[in-house]
Image (cartoon, helix red, strand yellow):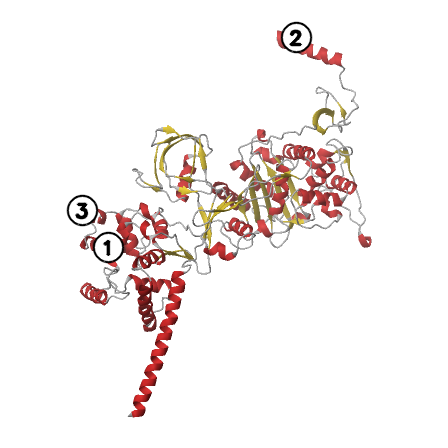
Amino acid sequence: MVWWKKYSIILFVLSAFVFFSYLGYLDYNVRKQFAGKRWAIPARVYASPVEIYKNYPLGLKAFEGLLSQLNYRRDYHLATPASYYRKNNFIYLRTRSFHFWDKRQDSLKLKLSFSGKQVSNIIDLETSGQLAIFRMDPVQIGSFYPTRKEDRILIRLEQAPDYLIQGLLSTEDRDFYHHHGISFKAIARAMWANLKAGSVVQGGSTITQQLVKNFYLTSERSLWRKFNEALMALILEYRFKKDDILEAYLNEIYLGQDGASSVHGFGLASEFYFGQPLEHLSLDQIATLVALVRGPSYYDPRRYPERCVKRRNLVLEEMHKQGYITKRQLIENKKKKLSVVSRVHRSANRYPAFMELVKRQLRQEYREDDLTSEGLRIFTTLDTQVQNTLEKTVSVKLTQLEKRPRVSKLEAAAIVTRRDSGEIVALAGSRHASSAGFNRALDAVRPIGSLMKPVVYLTALEYPDKYTLTTKISDTRITVKGPKGKNWTPKNYDNIEHGEVPLHTALSHSYNLATVHVGIDIGIARIAKTLRHLGVSRQVELFPSLLLGATPLTPLEVTQMYQTFAGDGFATPLRSIRAVISADGERLQNYPFTIRQTVDPAATYLTNTVLQEVMTEGTGRSAYLYMKKDLGLAGKTGTTNKLRDSWFAGFSGDFLSVVWVGRDDNKPAGLTGASGALQVWIRLMRQIARQPVNLIPPENIVFKWVDEESGLLASENCPGAKRFPYIKGSEPVESADCVESDIDRAKHWFNNFLQDTFR
């Protein structure tokens, strides 16, 4: 028997060693994860907040749409923030408080009056005075998640409503503050309650055990997992205070599923189910959240409202039994209906193409781990109204275009910026708004065709001693010698040579031959340099075909180029981000408005006047069939060989937008710039453009009346005379035959005066 005792002792010692080693291993992991950085908090990305003021162009219906996006609830009492109601042409509103990147705005009670498609008045209901301006809280457009797609809004224990703690203690763990991680009393009580009910109505797991299961373990059902759960619960209770454990539980517990992302913690669950912060919830709403602890899928209030109400009422009854609420409160709250908001994927990336641009710009300054774990708040330049309009426009218009003969399988990309700041307010990377695949706006490198021509003429106009808007250009056949005997002989789109034409006509009508004549004369290298000054950093090959847009660029690069045109020669880097704020409210990164002159403002002004002519007399003139003539639009069509690519870039006083339409397989799309991309541009801009283009001439610009045919000075009353701008010193000096003398002008003025006086 001696050997048996000996081996028994050895086995006991080994078992004890293994057990305590394993216990030490568990203890290390519990302490490391719990005491360290417990949660990876995804960065939240917000659209640009809507700033509303008197006469702001937003109709009542559109404003209600914004409130819907923000999950505001109808409530005639405005009892909580994020509530509103409509009465005739008025909206009564209680806003959410929100910490913006530059200031905090408290919750406001407001009355908004609407007239037509604009806000006519804003009244502060607290003071009864008029309010000049206020910000709506911004729409969350997405998040950057860690590998495990979990989302949460962290709360501290002292921020948790008393009813929440009381509800949890009543139903999940009455002895929480008295046990050491495992409660045999709770297990026995749960078994008895379940036996009486004939179903599972109570659980025996303590809050500590539930935290361990959510925080450390998988959902596997096995004795080994239960053994680990018990050990880790004991360790957690030994190492940490009860309040720390309860706070962690409030933030970790799984309470639902939002698409591919898990909803963890009561802070986020409050937003997900009720559209408002936890501290604003009523007793019945808090009881609903507590009810979900037992099974978020089974008691889902949107899918199974009857089950959820039954479980919520059970929570209320337990709270009453424990003395936390009165009989009257119990009866009143059991009668209430579930008040969950309609399902909105707040954690989903609503605008994947724009979100991709934001992420790329952020990666220049932040590591991937920072974006997916530090709880950053990122404020972007996206205007959700413009974005929604763009997405609908692209979808509808491409469907219409595909009804034409030999037009099919179209794709599109489009970017909209604010003309004055370069802020990107909308971006479409595909005709399918929800597509997270190939982002054509950022990555489709396509020849830009005639969009290159303004660059050629801008370069030429920087030499005013040689080129002005009225300089005659040869639009005749030209052959350019290439390497190894490969000559290049371009043609006009209509295969017609137009002879000697004024420079402004050559550009506004997009004549290829005239452009090549000018480009060869000025020099391809100079034109490539201008392209860089306009903001295009991509290396281009210095072939003659560059002059007609054979160089491939992305829509984003084209937008940067035309942003400089729209900025009157001042380059403004395109921006998608306004500010980055840390989880505790510290401003980490500013993205200030920057501007610098990169091309001659006078030459840019002359070019822009011709881009306006494109819209009145040239290839973009169909725009004015649908838009107001006083908008003074400026733009340029672009078409590539065999109609493979259809482009349009143009701006109003407030927005610049660039549109590309084509096919992914690079087969002919069957559309010119005017018949394809321009039509998308028109439908978009007629909905968003409000301000006219007001080109301000630099000080060295002078205006002269000129006889178009001869290019000589003329009088306003001369037949065929037109007023043109010139860089000072480059204007014509010789006069046409019809120019009146001073005496003739005086007689003409006197005759007109007599006619007007005695008419």
User: Residue 306: horizontal and vertical position, in percent?
Assistant: 27, 54
Along the horizontal axis of the image, is 131 left or right of 505? left
- Whether the residues at callouts 1 and 3 have beta carbons within 8 Å, the answer is no
Q: Horizontal and vertical percent for residue 225?
A: 34, 70
Badge 1 or badge 2: first in the primary sequence:
1
Q: Residues within 10 Å of mark 2 (few under 14, many from 20)?
A: few
The residue that disc 3 covers is 328
Q: Please determine whether, in this image, residue 549 is positioned above or below residue 616.
A: below
Mark 1 Cα shell of 10 Å, populated few (<14), some (14-19), many (≥20): many
Q: Is residue 15 above or below residue 688?
A: below
Q: Is residue 552 visible?
A: yes
Front position among marks 1 and 2: 1
Asked if the residue under mark 3 is in contact with the one under mark 2, i.e. CB atoms within 8 Å, the reply is no
Mark 2 or mark 3: whose residue is earlier in sequence: 3
Q: Relative to the observer, which residue lies in front, 218 or 408?
A: 218
Amino acid type indicated by mark 1: Val
Specify whether 64 is left or right of 610. left
